[in-house]
Amino acid sequence: MLRMPLHANPPHALGREARRLRGQAVAWWHALQLAAQILVLVLSPSSYTQGRSRAVLLHMVHAVLPLLPWFLVLSLLISLVIIRIVTATASSYGLSQYALEVLVRTLVLELIPLTAALFVALRHAMPGAEQLRAQLDARQRTGQRIPGIAGLAGVLLPRALASIHSVILLAALSGVIALVLTYLMVYGASPWALAGYTRDVGSVFTPVVSLIFGFKTFFFSLAVAVVPLAGAAEPDAHGRFVPRSDMTEFARLFSVLLMVEIVSLVGNYY
Protein backbone atom coordinates (compact mmCIF):
# COMPACT_ATOMS: atom_id res chain seq x y z
CA MET A 1 0.00 0.00 0.00
CA LEU A 2 1.45 3.35 -1.08
CA ARG A 3 1.49 6.25 1.33
CA MET A 4 1.57 9.89 0.38
CA PRO A 5 4.72 11.59 1.72
CA LEU A 6 4.25 14.27 4.28
CA HIS A 7 5.58 17.51 2.84
CA ALA A 8 5.17 19.52 5.99
CA ASN A 9 5.70 18.73 9.61
CA PRO A 10 2.68 20.00 11.60
CA PRO A 11 4.76 21.39 14.51
CA HIS A 12 7.02 23.20 12.07
CA ALA A 13 4.01 24.56 10.17
CA LEU A 14 2.48 25.80 13.41
CA GLY A 15 5.78 27.41 14.34
CA ARG A 16 5.99 29.22 11.01
CA GLU A 17 2.41 30.42 11.35
CA ALA A 18 3.07 31.64 14.89
CA ARG A 19 6.16 33.54 13.73
CA ARG A 20 4.19 35.06 10.86
CA LEU A 21 1.40 36.22 13.17
CA ARG A 22 3.94 37.57 15.63
CA GLY A 23 5.66 39.50 12.84
CA GLN A 24 2.35 41.00 11.74
CA ALA A 25 1.49 41.99 15.30
CA VAL A 26 4.89 43.64 15.73
CA ALA A 27 4.44 45.50 12.43
CA TRP A 28 1.00 46.82 13.45
CA TRP A 29 2.30 47.84 16.87
CA HIS A 30 5.19 49.63 15.17
CA ALA A 31 2.74 51.49 12.93
CA LEU A 32 0.60 52.53 15.92
CA GLN A 33 3.67 53.81 17.76
CA LEU A 34 4.74 55.79 14.73
CA ALA A 35 1.23 57.26 14.30
CA ALA A 36 1.18 58.37 17.94
CA GLN A 37 4.63 59.94 17.71
CA ILE A 38 3.77 61.74 14.47
CA LEU A 39 0.59 63.14 16.04
CA VAL A 40 2.64 64.38 19.00
CA LEU A 41 5.14 65.99 16.63
CA VAL A 42 2.36 67.60 14.59
CA LEU A 43 0.82 69.15 17.71
CA SER A 44 4.17 70.21 19.18
CA PRO A 45 5.25 73.83 18.43
CA SER A 46 8.91 72.83 18.63
CA SER A 47 8.46 70.76 15.46
CA TYR A 48 8.02 73.92 13.41
CA THR A 49 11.34 75.62 13.98
CA GLN A 50 12.93 77.56 11.15
CA GLY A 51 14.82 74.58 9.75
CA ARG A 52 11.97 72.08 9.94
CA SER A 53 9.25 74.44 8.72
CA ARG A 54 11.11 74.96 5.45
CA ALA A 55 11.42 71.19 4.96
CA VAL A 56 7.71 70.75 5.73
CA LEU A 57 6.72 73.40 3.18
CA LEU A 58 8.96 71.90 0.49
CA HIS A 59 7.52 68.43 1.01
CA MET A 60 3.98 69.82 0.89
CA VAL A 61 4.66 71.50 -2.43
CA HIS A 62 6.21 68.34 -3.89
CA ALA A 63 3.30 66.26 -2.60
CA VAL A 64 0.59 68.45 -4.14
CA LEU A 65 1.76 70.17 -7.33
CA PRO A 66 2.74 67.07 -9.37
CA LEU A 67 -0.49 65.28 -8.38
CA LEU A 68 -2.98 68.13 -8.62
CA PRO A 69 -3.57 68.35 -12.42
CA TRP A 70 -3.75 64.59 -12.97
CA PHE A 71 -6.02 63.95 -10.01
CA LEU A 72 -8.39 66.77 -10.92
CA VAL A 73 -8.67 65.45 -14.48
CA LEU A 74 -9.26 61.93 -13.17
CA SER A 75 -11.82 63.19 -10.67
CA LEU A 76 -13.57 65.19 -13.39
CA LEU A 77 -13.89 62.16 -15.68
CA ILE A 78 -15.04 59.81 -12.93
CA SER A 79 -17.57 62.36 -11.67
CA LEU A 80 -18.98 62.91 -15.15
CA VAL A 81 -19.44 59.18 -15.71
CA ILE A 82 -21.04 58.51 -12.32
CA ILE A 83 -23.31 61.56 -12.49
CA ARG A 84 -24.50 60.55 -15.95
CA ILE A 85 -25.16 56.94 -14.91
CA VAL A 86 -27.05 57.89 -11.74
CA THR A 87 -29.17 60.61 -13.36
CA ALA A 88 -30.05 58.48 -16.38
CA THR A 89 -30.92 55.46 -14.22
CA ALA A 90 -33.02 57.52 -11.80
CA SER A 91 -34.86 59.19 -14.68
CA SER A 92 -35.66 55.87 -16.38
CA TYR A 93 -37.22 54.53 -13.16
CA GLY A 94 -39.04 57.76 -12.30
CA LEU A 95 -36.85 58.43 -9.25
CA SER A 96 -35.23 61.69 -10.33
CA GLN A 97 -36.05 63.32 -6.98
CA TYR A 98 -33.61 60.93 -5.27
CA ALA A 99 -30.76 61.28 -7.78
CA LEU A 100 -29.17 64.29 -6.09
CA GLU A 101 -29.01 62.70 -2.65
CA VAL A 102 -27.61 59.47 -4.09
CA LEU A 103 -24.93 61.40 -5.96
CA VAL A 104 -23.86 63.42 -2.93
CA ARG A 105 -23.76 60.39 -0.66
CA THR A 106 -21.95 58.02 -3.03
CA LEU A 107 -19.68 60.42 -4.89
CA VAL A 108 -18.78 63.15 -2.41
CA LEU A 109 -19.06 61.31 0.89
CA GLU A 110 -17.66 57.91 -0.07
CA LEU A 111 -15.81 57.67 -3.39
CA ILE A 112 -13.87 60.93 -3.51
CA PRO A 113 -12.04 60.65 -0.13
CA LEU A 114 -11.11 57.02 -0.82
CA THR A 115 -9.92 57.87 -4.35
CA ALA A 116 -7.82 60.78 -3.06
CA ALA A 117 -6.23 58.57 -0.40
CA LEU A 118 -5.37 55.80 -2.86
CA PHE A 119 -4.05 58.29 -5.44
CA VAL A 120 -1.73 60.00 -2.96
CA ALA A 121 -0.61 56.65 -1.56
CA LEU A 122 0.33 55.22 -4.97
CA ARG A 123 1.82 58.38 -6.45
CA HIS A 124 3.53 59.98 -3.46
CA ALA A 125 3.50 58.20 -0.08
CA MET A 126 4.61 54.71 -1.11
CA PRO A 127 7.36 55.86 -3.53
CA GLY A 128 8.60 58.26 -0.85
CA ALA A 129 8.65 55.43 1.71
CA GLU A 130 10.62 53.25 -0.70
CA GLN A 131 13.11 56.07 -1.20
CA LEU A 132 13.48 56.48 2.57
CA ARG A 133 14.04 52.74 3.04
CA ALA A 134 16.68 52.78 0.30
CA GLN A 135 18.45 55.63 2.10
CA LEU A 136 18.38 53.71 5.39
CA ASP A 137 19.71 50.61 3.62
CA ALA A 138 22.54 52.66 2.09
CA ARG A 139 23.44 54.11 5.48
CA GLN A 140 23.43 50.65 7.01
CA ARG A 141 25.68 49.26 4.28
CA THR A 142 28.22 52.02 4.87
CA GLY A 143 28.31 51.24 8.59
CA GLN A 144 26.42 54.33 9.80
CA ARG A 145 24.18 54.03 12.81
CA ILE A 146 20.45 53.95 12.08
CA PRO A 147 18.51 56.06 14.60
CA GLY A 148 15.18 55.01 16.05
CA ILE A 149 11.81 56.56 15.27
CA ALA A 150 12.53 59.50 17.58
CA GLY A 151 15.80 60.13 15.78
CA LEU A 152 14.06 60.01 12.41
CA ALA A 153 11.49 62.64 13.41
CA GLY A 154 13.13 65.30 11.28
CA VAL A 155 12.77 63.05 8.24
CA LEU A 156 9.38 61.46 8.97
CA LEU A 157 7.47 64.57 10.05
CA PRO A 158 7.75 66.54 6.76
CA ARG A 159 6.83 63.47 4.71
CA ALA A 160 3.84 62.63 6.94
CA LEU A 161 2.52 66.21 6.96
CA ALA A 162 2.89 66.41 3.19
CA SER A 163 0.80 63.26 2.68
CA ILE A 164 -1.87 64.43 5.14
CA HIS A 165 -2.09 67.83 3.46
CA SER A 166 -2.20 66.30 -0.02
CA VAL A 167 -5.06 63.89 0.73
CA ILE A 168 -7.20 66.54 2.45
CA LEU A 169 -6.60 69.16 -0.25
CA LEU A 170 -7.27 66.83 -3.18
CA ALA A 171 -10.42 65.46 -1.52
CA ALA A 172 -11.74 68.98 -0.84
CA LEU A 173 -11.05 70.25 -4.38
CA SER A 174 -12.51 67.20 -6.08
CA GLY A 175 -15.57 67.36 -3.82
CA VAL A 176 -16.23 70.95 -4.91
CA ILE A 177 -15.76 69.95 -8.55
CA ALA A 178 -18.21 67.06 -8.16
CA LEU A 179 -20.84 69.32 -6.59
CA VAL A 180 -20.48 71.90 -9.38
CA LEU A 181 -20.68 69.23 -12.08
CA THR A 182 -23.74 67.71 -10.44
CA TYR A 183 -25.52 71.05 -10.52
CA LEU A 184 -24.59 71.71 -14.15
CA MET A 185 -25.64 68.27 -15.36
CA VAL A 186 -28.90 68.23 -13.41
CA TYR A 187 -30.06 71.86 -13.74
CA GLY A 188 -27.88 73.26 -16.50
CA ALA A 189 -26.33 76.74 -16.41
CA SER A 190 -29.46 78.35 -14.96
CA PRO A 191 -28.88 80.09 -11.59
CA TRP A 192 -32.53 79.79 -10.49
CA ALA A 193 -32.15 76.31 -9.00
CA LEU A 194 -29.15 77.28 -6.87
CA ALA A 195 -31.18 77.92 -3.70
CA GLY A 196 -32.98 74.57 -3.90
CA TYR A 197 -29.76 72.76 -4.78
CA THR A 198 -27.96 74.28 -1.80
CA ARG A 199 -30.84 73.29 0.47
CA ASP A 200 -30.85 69.71 -0.82
CA VAL A 201 -27.08 69.33 -0.43
CA GLY A 202 -27.25 70.87 3.04
CA SER A 203 -29.92 68.35 4.04
CA VAL A 204 -27.43 65.57 3.31
CA PHE A 205 -24.57 67.22 5.21
CA THR A 206 -26.15 67.07 8.64
CA PRO A 207 -23.86 67.82 11.62
CA VAL A 208 -23.32 64.12 12.30
CA VAL A 209 -22.61 63.27 8.64
CA SER A 210 -20.26 66.25 8.30
CA LEU A 211 -18.37 65.26 11.45
CA ILE A 212 -18.00 61.65 10.27
CA PHE A 213 -16.92 62.86 6.83
CA GLY A 214 -14.25 65.10 8.35
CA PHE A 215 -12.94 62.38 10.66
CA LYS A 216 -12.92 59.83 7.84
CA THR A 217 -10.93 62.10 5.53
CA PHE A 218 -8.46 62.88 8.30
CA PHE A 219 -7.94 59.23 9.23
CA PHE A 220 -7.58 58.36 5.54
CA SER A 221 -4.82 60.96 5.27
CA LEU A 222 -3.21 59.78 8.52
CA ALA A 223 -3.18 56.17 7.29
CA VAL A 224 -1.61 57.20 3.98
CA ALA A 225 1.01 59.21 5.86
CA VAL A 226 1.86 56.68 8.57
CA VAL A 227 1.50 53.13 7.22
CA PRO A 228 4.06 53.39 4.35
CA LEU A 229 6.52 55.28 6.58
CA ALA A 230 6.12 52.71 9.35
CA GLY A 231 6.98 49.94 6.90
CA ALA A 232 9.97 51.90 5.61
CA ALA A 233 11.38 52.61 9.09
CA GLU A 234 10.88 49.03 10.32
CA PRO A 235 13.84 46.64 9.90
CA ASP A 236 13.23 43.05 8.92
CA ALA A 237 13.83 40.00 11.11
CA HIS A 238 17.60 40.26 10.46
CA GLY A 239 17.74 43.99 11.29
CA ARG A 240 18.20 45.04 7.67
CA PHE A 241 16.37 47.58 5.50
CA VAL A 242 16.24 45.61 2.27
CA PRO A 243 13.42 46.51 -0.18
CA ARG A 244 10.03 44.96 0.47
CA SER A 245 7.17 43.89 -1.76
CA ASP A 246 4.98 46.77 -2.90
CA MET A 247 1.90 44.55 -2.82
CA THR A 248 2.47 43.68 0.83
CA GLU A 249 2.75 47.34 1.81
CA PHE A 250 -0.27 48.28 -0.30
CA ALA A 251 -2.35 45.45 1.20
CA ARG A 252 -1.52 46.68 4.71
CA LEU A 253 -2.49 50.24 3.80
CA PHE A 254 -5.67 49.18 2.01
CA SER A 255 -6.78 47.13 5.02
CA VAL A 256 -6.48 50.23 7.22
CA LEU A 257 -8.43 52.34 4.72
CA LEU A 258 -11.08 49.63 4.51
CA MET A 259 -11.48 49.55 8.29
CA VAL A 260 -11.90 53.34 8.40
CA GLU A 261 -14.46 53.17 5.59
CA ILE A 262 -16.45 50.44 7.35
CA VAL A 263 -16.54 52.42 10.60
CA SER A 264 -17.73 55.53 8.73
CA LEU A 265 -20.48 53.55 6.96
CA VAL A 266 -21.67 52.16 10.27
CA GLY A 267 -21.75 55.67 11.72
CA ASN A 268 -23.66 57.12 8.76
CA TYR A 269 -26.24 54.42 8.09
CA TYR A 270 -26.76 52.41 11.29
Image: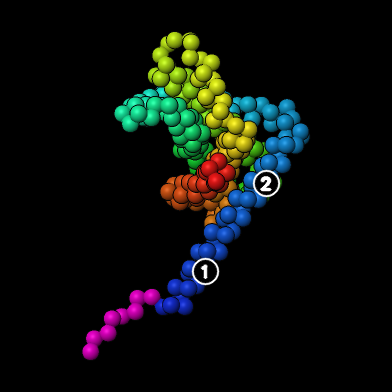
Q: Of helix, strand and loop, which mostly describes the magenta segment? A: loop
Residue 50: give x, y in percent of width and height.
Answer: 73, 27
- Asked if residue 260 shows in the view, the reply is no
Residue 115: give x, y in percent of width and height.
Answer: 46, 35
Q: Is residue 176 left or right of residue 94?
A: right
| Residue 5 belongs to the span the image colors magenta | yes
Residue nearest the viewer, comparing 169 with 59: 169
Q: Is residue 1 left or right of residue 169?
A: left
Residue nearest the viewer, comparing 184 with 20: 184
Disc number for residue 36 = 2
* Magenta-drawn segment: 1-8
- Residue sitting at 58 percent across and 54 percent down? 28
Q: Is residue 172 left or right of residue 4?
A: right
State the quadrant of the N terminus.
Answer: bottom left
| Residue 162 belongs to the span the image colors magenta | no
Disc number for residue 238 = none
Quadrant in the rendering for residue 218 = top right
Residue 37: give x, y in percent of width and height.
Answer: 69, 45
Q: Which residue is mark 1?
A: 18
- Asked if residue 47 shows in the view, the reply is yes
- Residue sitting at 69 percent across and 31 percent down? 52
Q: Earlier in the sequence, mark 2 or mark 1?
A: 1
The three-letter code of the residue at mark 2 reads: Ala
